[in-house]
Amino acid sequence: MIEAVGANMLLASSGPDLPGVNDFLPPEILFQGTPFAINRIILIRLVATVVLLVVLGITAARAKLIPGRWQGLVEYGIEFVRNNVVYETMGELRGRRYVPMITTLFFTIFVFNLFGIIPGANMAATATVTMPLVFAIWVLIQYWIAAVREKGLWHYIRDECFTPGVPWPIYILLAPIQLLELLIVRPASLTIRLFANMISGHLVLATCLAFAQYWFIEAANKFVGIPVGGLWFVGGFVMTLFEAFIAFLQAYVFAILATVYINLSYPDE
Amino acid sequence: MDIITLAEVAGNLSVIGYGLATIGPGIGLGILFGKAMESTARQPEMSGKIQTIMFIGLALVELLGLLGFVALLIK
């Protein structure tokens, strides 16, 4: 009997189609059962990569001495990363080596994030843990390589974990914390920041639009439903614009933190 | 759906917990942006550098809120 009541309650409260964690675990659509299984998010990643390569490739192939409007925009983006992110943090001498890497990181993450608000995709390609993890591991490897090249492995670990000028009993606490920071906390924080931002953005956006659809179409009382649905729709519109800003901000933050971490591997003058 | 499932309202505690968890980063963001504005007003010629440092701090503060969010997802 209780089950019948429960089922009735479930029917009566068939509310809006709210998003959940399952949005980020879509079913596999190609090559099921193999290690190369492709689901919706991976397909978006592939599409985003192709779009980025084609757009930048065509822009580069048709580059003129006097840039047109589009070429000017792309050059502005590249110069923004070079001057405001890399040179500002590392200086020109050190930074020149890392401009291609940071530019790649910035543009890839920016375009991947933007797919969260492009109709039809509606899912940021960085919204699962794997893609940000790949970028973070790339940064991890780069700052270890920079440290080994500039200071030597032992000197780097000594400088970071056994910072000079600290009384020795502190090292028992400080050394493991610093080592953990170098190996795990930095890449983990980069990963979590990016994918959690994209997940929360998608959830907020989808919630706004689901409620808008519910109040517009399914609500019995249209007199209340239309204004409330309109409010939710405006909220969804504003959140879409906000997500575009977040897409840029996260790409910028990822790029600048990667630069800072690499810069920390260099010796202080 | 039985009595045990009806008692699942308790699951919403995690939402309350996440709401509490955002207070700390909220205070942090307030201090961060307030200080950044203050120092930009004092030394406008350093605004580029201050902005860079501000965004690094923003990323670190924001991470604290997002940790709570991730904990809510994997609960």
Image (spheres, helix red, strand yellow):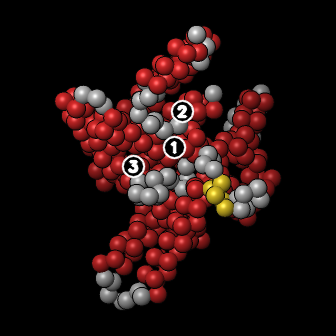
How far separated are the C-alphas under marks 3 and 1? 11 Å
Work out whether A54 lies above or below A1.
below
Q: Quadrant where the C terminus of chain B lies?
A: top right
**Left or right for A219, reference A152:** left
Q: Chain of mark 3?
A: A
Q: Are the residues under marks 2 and 3 on the same chain?
A: no
- Name the amino acid type tagged 3: Glu
Q: CA distance from mark 2 to mark 1?
A: 10 Å
Q: Amino acid at mark 2?
A: Phe
Q: Element at badge 3? A: helix
Residue drawn at the location 19% of the way across and 30% of the way down:
A223
Q: Which numbered marker is on residue A243?
A: 3
Percent x, y for residue A61? 46, 87
Where on the picture, by quarter, is residue A168? top right
Whether residue A235 can be seen here: no
* Chain to which the residue tagged by mark 1 belongs: A
Q: Nearer the viewer, residue B27 or A122?
A: A122
Q: For the residues labelled 2 and 1, say whether their Cβ atoms are less than 8 Å apart.
A: yes
Which residue corresponds to the image point at 74% horizontal and 52% vertical from the top-left?
A156
* Residue A111 appears in the figure: yes
* Residue at 39% from the left image edge and 39% from the top image edge: A210
Q: In the rendered structure, are the residues bearing label 3 and label 1 in contact, judged by CB atoms less than 8 Å apart?
A: no
Name the disc covering residue A199, or none: 1
Residue B49: x and y in percent read 40, 53
Q: Report which residue position mark 2 lands on.
A: B69
Residue A264 rendering spot, x and y as whole percentages: 61, 53
